[in-house]
Image (spheres, helix red, strand yellow):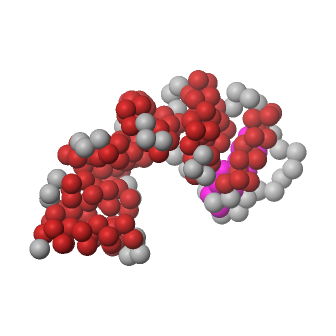
Amino acid sequence: MGLFDRFKSGTAPTQQGLTAEGWNSKGGALYRLNRYQEALQCFDKALEIDPRYAYAWGLKGTALYALDRDQEALQCLDKALKIDPKNADAWALKGAALYALGRLQEALPCLDKALEIDPRNFLAWYNKGLSLDKLGHYAEAVRCFDKALEIDPRFVRAWNNKGVSLYHLGRYAEAIGCFDKALEIDPQYALAQKGKRMALAERS
């Protein structure tokens, strides 16, 4: 289960005088509406009430990551993990934030920790693939993207980045197949369009 999987509502709750869990739930709903700044305010309210609410620290880290505030996200995720070190989603997101900061060698152990706790955490497999590709370990990256796609076959970014890693390996026909799969899911996905053009040019 992802950090926000329990928040399925399409509208944000409006109750006042909420408990920590209530503020957390409202923040999760706002996050799903891409209202990240408002979501942060709700997570802060939850943490004012219960500073040891690990789930709220994790969600606050997720919202900060969505706002590209990666260093602040790391601080929140570290707090979540200090309280609940078995939180696979927090480990996975910490790895993603470290990747975004270019700290690849630090990202990989976090992603491995997430997968040790939850081998079906597809975001951990995906971000591990990104990190390995960036480090030039293209075949290992492909295997990670495959793992992510076994869990979520419609994960368009995983299809695209599998294509990128295959392109780096010179396996252009396979790369084109991955870009085609990404475009089948999202015909407007610009990165897959660009990747396919590059692979076609190399193959011709």
* One can see residue 120 in this view: no
Residue 115 sits in quarter: top left
Residue 151: x and y in percent read 35, 50
Q: Nearer the viewer, residue 28 or 93?
A: 93
User: Which residue is pictured at 38% across the width and 76% down the height?
Assistant: 187
Q: Return the x and y of residue 92 as percentages of the image width and height.
A: 46, 39
Stretch of the chain drawn in magenta = 21-33
* Residue 11 to residue 128: above or below: below
Q: Quadrant of the C terminus?
A: bottom left
Relative to 71, 167 lies left or right: left
Residue 30 visible (yes or no)? yes
Q: Is residue 175 left or right of residue 128?
A: left
Q: Residue at x 43, y 36 (%)?
A: 103
- Total labels drawn: 0
Q: Is residue 58 left or right of residue 37?
A: left
Q: Is residue 30 magenta?
A: yes
| Of the pair 203 and 36, the residue shown nearer to us | 203
Residue 184 among those drawn in magenta: no
Query: Picture coordinates of residue 26 (x, y %)?
Result: 73, 51
Which percent across, then down, holds residue 176?
Answer: 21, 67
Q: Is the magenta region chiefly helix, strand or loop?
A: helix
**Measuring 51% from the left and 46% from the top, which residue is drawn there?**
2
Residue at 81 percent across and 56 percent down: it is 14
Q: Is residue 172 above or below residue 29?
A: below
* 52 is higher (above) or lower (below) than 69: above
Residue 46: quarter of image: top right
Q: Residue furthest left?
A: 204
